[in-house]
Image (cartoon, grey):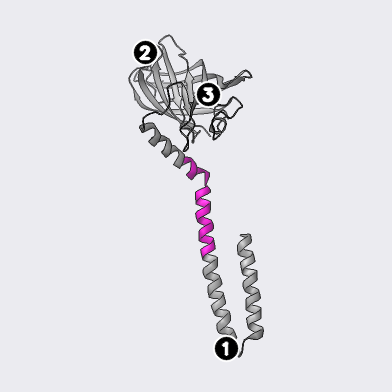
Amino acid sequence: MKSLGLLLAALAVVVTLASADSPPAQSHDEIIDKLIERTNKITTSISHVESLLDDRLDPKRIRKAGSLRHRVEELEDPSCDEHEHQCGGDDPQCISKLFVCDGHNDCRNGEDEKDCTLPTKAGDKFIGDVVFDHCTKRRPEHMTLAFESSSIAAFFTPIADLHVHIEIESETDEDESEVSMPADGEYSFADHRLTIHPPEEDGLGLVGEFDGYNFDRFVGHIVHELSEEVCAEFIFHRKK
């Protein structure tokens, strides 16, 4: 907008000079009308460019584009081993997952130290809506993950330890029930992965994966701890 102000000031000077040096009154009016018309066109063009720049810098649009890119990358064959982290960008460098968020730039592009803010802090709640469920005994339509506490050891920063409560409301023809189960877990910065250990003897845990761009949403899978078989899926969104 500063550039627009300077432009208008310059045009005002031109109008003044034209008024002083041009012949007859009608010619002055014609010159001024043309200058005003050109000024309006330039103003419209500048506003359009500014609008396009604002759209490209809109955080929601950037996050949406990043999430789409993540989905495409998920379809590609992995370029790193299972226990390695892909640095991203045009440099296909692989580093150990244990080097991510350790306070040192191990990726040449510094990507391994960019997303080191824990997305699940004490007091946060995520509401999960069921996609399919072939194994839980309560068959809930929704479940809530309430994060009670988190900690990161000074000597091992790639992993955060978590304590949560899994809150479930279920309803059958005979009964309504509500349960809150405490559970422990961890968050891996390298994978943007949340792992909740089984809170009950059935051995069912929860693995949630953020896409690395939108940290208000993750896909959660209920898995058998021993076999790692997925038997239910919930889509979780942060409760505002």
> Is 141 located above or below residue 8 in the figure?
above
Q: Tell me where residue 154 sits by quadrant.
A: top right
Disc 3 or 2, which lies upstream in sequence? 3
Check the picture and name the quadrant holding the N terminus.
bottom right
> Which residue was labeled with disc 2?
227
SS category of the residue bearing label 1: helix
Disc 3 or 1, which lies upstream in sequence? 1
Magenta stretch contains residue 55: yes
> Which residue was labeled with disc 1?
26
Residue 17 picture location, percent across and down = 65, 80
Q: Is residue 102 left or right of residue 174?
A: right
Tell me the tag on residue 61: none
SS category of the residue bearing label 3: strand
Please name the predominant secondary structure of the magenta segment in the image.
Answer: helix
214 vs 90, nearest the viewer = 90
Q: Is residue 221 left or right of residue 145?
A: left
Q: Disc 3 versus disc 1: distance between alpha carbons?
A: 75 Å
Provide the residue span drawn in magenta: 45-63
Q: Disc 3 versus disc 2: distance between alpha carbons?
A: 26 Å
Mark 1 crowdedness (10 Å alpha carbons): few <14, some 14-19, many ≥20: few
Residue 98 picture location, percent across and down = 53, 21
Q: Name the kind of residue labelled 1 in the image.
A: Gln
Residue 209 picture location, percent across and down = 45, 27
Disc 1 or 2, which lies upstream in sequence? 1
What residue is drawn where x is 60% and y is 27%? 104
From the image, state whether disc 3 or disc 2 is nearer to you. Answer: 2
Q: Disc 1 versus disc 2: distance between alpha carbons?
A: 89 Å
58 vs 134, nearest the viewer = 58
> Which residue was labeled with disc 3?
146
